[in-house]
Amino acid sequence: MSNSMALDNTGIDPAALQRYLEEQIYTLPGTTRHRDEFSILLTGSRAIGAFQPGSDVDLDVVCPRPTYESVHRESLKVGIITAARSFFCPLAGEDWHRYFGRQMGCPHFSLTPLEEVERHLREFNDVQLWIWTNAKIITDPQTQFARSISNFKGYPNDVLIKKIKYRSLMAEHAGIDIYPLHHTSDEDLVAAANSISNMVSELLRLFFLVEGKPFPYAEKLMFYAKETKLGKEFCPLLQQIINLVVGKDSAEKEAWPRLDKALEMLLGEDKSEEARALAAAWAKAMLAAGVEPQWVEADYENIDELLSGELGPVP
């Protein structure tokens, strides 16, 4: 039986979930020992308390690699999946609502080797770390998943500092070098909008990292960044900036004045009180996290560390 207590405050009926497991997951070909080999996790919005009534049911199934390879091979043969190198399985057909009702989104699950989870932990993959450490365990034979997750004790200091530097420079690079400051036509609008939205996203990721925490996937960045110290202070500003980008609740109908104003609120420290406050808090948070004062003082003069690859690939 599944751990029904893990479903508290998720909006999921334990009996409906058990029926889904029995019919959709415990019938997968390639093994006869599903209950002994499959750790089943609730992930996504229902696991983290951010769901709406129509949110779907996201499940991740973790198992040893030999089992994964066998189940993947046999599932590919019979057409349960079509991807040669991954395993994602939305519920086929039009009667998916028979498990959780029409008011909830279509349930789906992914199959992942336990060794892949452990690699995510070793490589400090931020989004995957966030997903795995926020997962609700439904079943976990021999506590295989829980034991793997227990190995994550937080980022080593050198790893964390590199991540903070990387995201800080990525944010500034988006605003300083990507934004078409001398725009002459609407063909530049794509670059301008992407520049500002990317800078906002990088800042949101930074808000987590300066507290030593992994950040979530893009859809939930703003939602959960509000719980960080910097997020509580600056998420309203960043939302206001995004509203300017998309033209929400703005008296200014022309795109370029809105976009230029948004950039000024982000980086225009010589003109914008908001930008000055953001820059000061940003620098203070990096110092508190352990970034060297001279690096923080040099600010964007450090850009070659990003562009040369010294900070490595995307951490």
Image (cartoon, grey):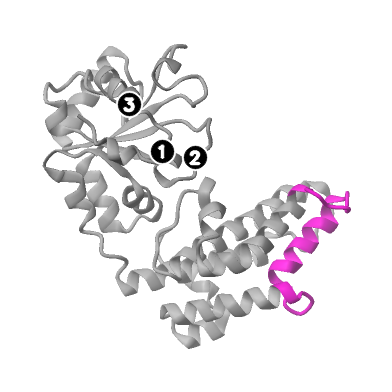
Indicate whether 90 appears above or below 5.
above
| Relative image position of residue 72 (x, y in whole percent) | 24, 25
Q: Indicate which disc, 1 or 3, sits on the residue closer to the N terminus.
A: 1
Q: Is 268 one of the magenta-colored residues?
A: yes
Element on which disc 2 rests:
loop
> Taking 239 as reference, is 222 left or right?
left
**Amino acid on which the number 1 mark rests in the picture:** Thr
Quickly name the residue at label 3.
17
- The CA distance from mark 1 to mark 3 is 12 Å
Q: Is 110 situated above or below 96? A: below
For label 1, the residue is 10
Q: Which residue is mark 2?
A: 51
Q: Position of residue 304 (x, y in %)?
A: 52, 73
Which corner quadrant holds the C terminus? Answer: bottom left
Which residue lies at the image location 34% right of the left edge and 53% below the top edge? 129
Q: Secondary structure at mark 3?
A: helix
Q: Residue at x 49, y 40 (%)?
A: 51
**For residue 121: magenta?**
no
Q: Is residue 301 visible?
A: no
Q: Residues within 10 Å of mark 1 (few under 14, many from 20)?
A: some
Which amino acid type corresponds to the residue marked 2 in the rendered image?
A: Phe
What residue is shown at x 47% (from left), y 67% (from top)? 166
Left or right: residue 195 compared with residue 21: right
Q: Sequence order check: which comes first, mark 2 or mark 3?
A: 3
Tell which of 172 and 149 is nearer to you.
Answer: 149
Span colored in magenta? 246-274
Residue 163, horizontal then vertical, whole percent: 42, 67
Query: Do the residues bearing badges 2 and 1 touch, measured as CB atoms within 8 Å?
Result: yes
